[in-house]
Image (cartoon, rainbow, N blue to C red):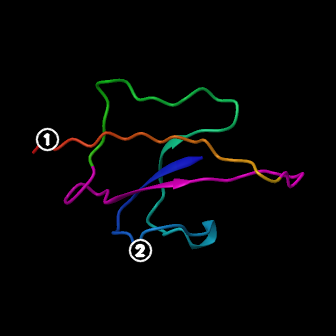
């Protein structure tokens, strides 16, 4: 899973396939892979999101691998983000 910062407003909410990922989503914020520990920023770390910041959207890119086509698998991924109004 990769989380990207995107400069443009989302074209539409929801899901899209990787080949159609917006071209302005090129700054990887948090990479993660199976077997890795949870990624947590320290308490004193953050980033700007919103007007006049250069980042208007965050996109989570997920890739699944199920080579045996096991049915009934459920993704239990959790993404937690805290948004603060500091202006």
* Range of magenta residues: 49-70
Q: Quadrant of residue 87?
A: top left
Q: Which residue is mark 2?
A: 12
Q: Is residue 25 above or below residue 35?
A: below
| Residue toward you, 24 or 50 | 50
How many numbered discs? 2
Please name the predominant secondary structure of the magenta segment in the image: loop
| Magenta highlight on residue 55 | yes
Q: Residue at x 42, y 39 (%)?
A: 80
Residue 25 location in percent, x, y?
A: 46, 61
The single residue placed furthest to the right in the displayed view is: 68
Q: Is residue 65 above or below residue 78?
A: below
The single residue placed furthest to the left in the displayed view is: 87
Q: Residue at x 59, y 38 (%)?
A: 32
Residue 55 location in percent, x, y?
A: 32, 56
Q: Which residue is mark 1?
A: 86
Is mark 2 in CB contact (under 8 Å) with mark 1?
no
Residue 54 location in percent, x, y?
A: 28, 57
Task: State left or right for residue 50 relative to residue 60.
Answer: left
Element at badge 2? loop
Q: Residues within 10 Å of mark 2 (few under 14, many from 20)?
A: few
Q: Residues within 10 Å of mark 1 (few under 14, many from 20)?
A: few
Cα separation, mark 2 vs mark 1, equals 27 Å
Q: Quadrant of residue 20?
A: bottom right
Element at badge 1? loop
Which is nearer the N-term, disc 2 or disc 1? Answer: 2
| Magenta highlight on residue 41 | no
| Residue toward you, 1 or 81 | 81
């Amino acid at each position: 899973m990769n989380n990207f910062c995107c400069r443009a407003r989302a074209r539409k909410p929801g899901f899209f396939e990787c080949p159609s990922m917006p071209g302005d989503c090129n700054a990887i914020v948090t990479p993660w892979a199976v077997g890795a520990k949870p990624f947590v920023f320290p308490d004193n770390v953050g980033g700007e999101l919103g007007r006049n910041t250069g980042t208007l959207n965050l996109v989570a890119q997920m890739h699944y691998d199920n080579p045996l086509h096991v049915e009934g698998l459920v993704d239990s991924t959790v993404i937690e983000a805290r948004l603060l109004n500091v202006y």
